[in-house]
Amino acid sequence: QVQLVESGGGLVQPGGSLRLSCHTSGFDLDYFSNAWFRQAPGKEREGVSCISPIDDTISYGDSVKGRFTMSRMSRGGATGTLYLQMHNLKPEDTAIYYCATDVQPSACRNFRAARSSDFSSWGQGTQVTVSS
């Protein structure tokens, strides 16, 4: 059974840093498309970053490029962790952050569209609030 559990959210001041984790089980990270999304109150879901299993390319949304870094750690077999390191945080980064995964190798191609149908499994989300 595929499971994803996010952690690491919280309150941080503008300009600060935060690292989110997504603990995964039930699938091998290295062979799935894995992504981070976020959704702020009253706004549409936004694609933050995505790792493709085809060539390990990591793509980022324009609003976070240069500030956020996605990585993954596979523990071999069916467990692992996705990370999202966030630097120079801004108030507009305030949102609930979700990790998601899908077996389709090409799922990252359209991650910026942030369609829930493109990724079959999602975590419950973790709140990030950037405020002074």
Image: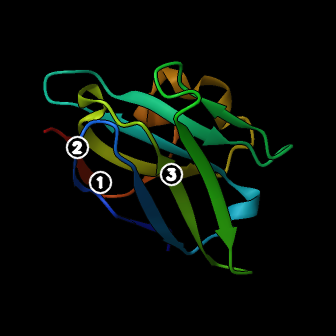
Task: Please give the label number shown on residue 35.
Answer: none
Few, some or many residues within 10 Å of mark 3 (<14, 14–19, 20+): many
Which amino acid type is shown beneath numbered disc 3? Leu
| Separation of marks 1 and 3 at Cα, in angstroms | 13 Å
Mark 1 and mark 3 in contact? Answer it, CB < 8 Å: no
Q: Picture coordinates of residue 32 (x, y %)? A: 69, 54
Few, some or many residues within 10 Å of mark 1 (<14, 14–19, 20+): many
Q: How many marks?
A: 3
Q: Quadrant of the C terminus?
A: top left
Say which quarter of the image contains residue 74: bottom right
Q: Which of marks 3 and 2 is in front?
A: 2
Which amino acid type is shown beneath numbered disc 2? Gln
- In the figure, 67 relative to 83: above or below? above
The structure residue drawn at horizontal position 14% and vertical position 29%, both measured from the top left corner, is 41
- In the figure, 103 relative to 59: above or below? below
The structure residue drawn at horizontal position 73% and vertical position 43%, both measured from the top left corner, is 52
Q: Earlier in the sequence, mark 2 or mark 1?
A: 2
Residue at image mark 2: 13
Residue at image mark 3: 84
- In the figure, 25 relative to 129: above or below? below
Which amino acid type is shown beneath numbered disc 1? Gly
The structure residue drawn at horizontal position 72% and vertical position 80%, both measured from the top left corner, is 77
Q: Picture coordinates of residue 29 (x, y %)? A: 67, 63
Task: Check disc 3 and report its element: helix, strand or loop.
Answer: strand
Task: Check disc 1 and report its element: helix, strand or loop.
Answer: loop
| Separation of marks 3 and 2 at Cα, in angstroms | 17 Å
Residue at image mark 1: 125
Task: Check disc 2 and report its element: helix, strand or loop.
Answer: loop
- In the figure, 5 relative to 85: above or below? below
Q: Picture coordinates of residue 47 (x, y %)? A: 47, 30
Say which quarter of the image contains residue 45: top left
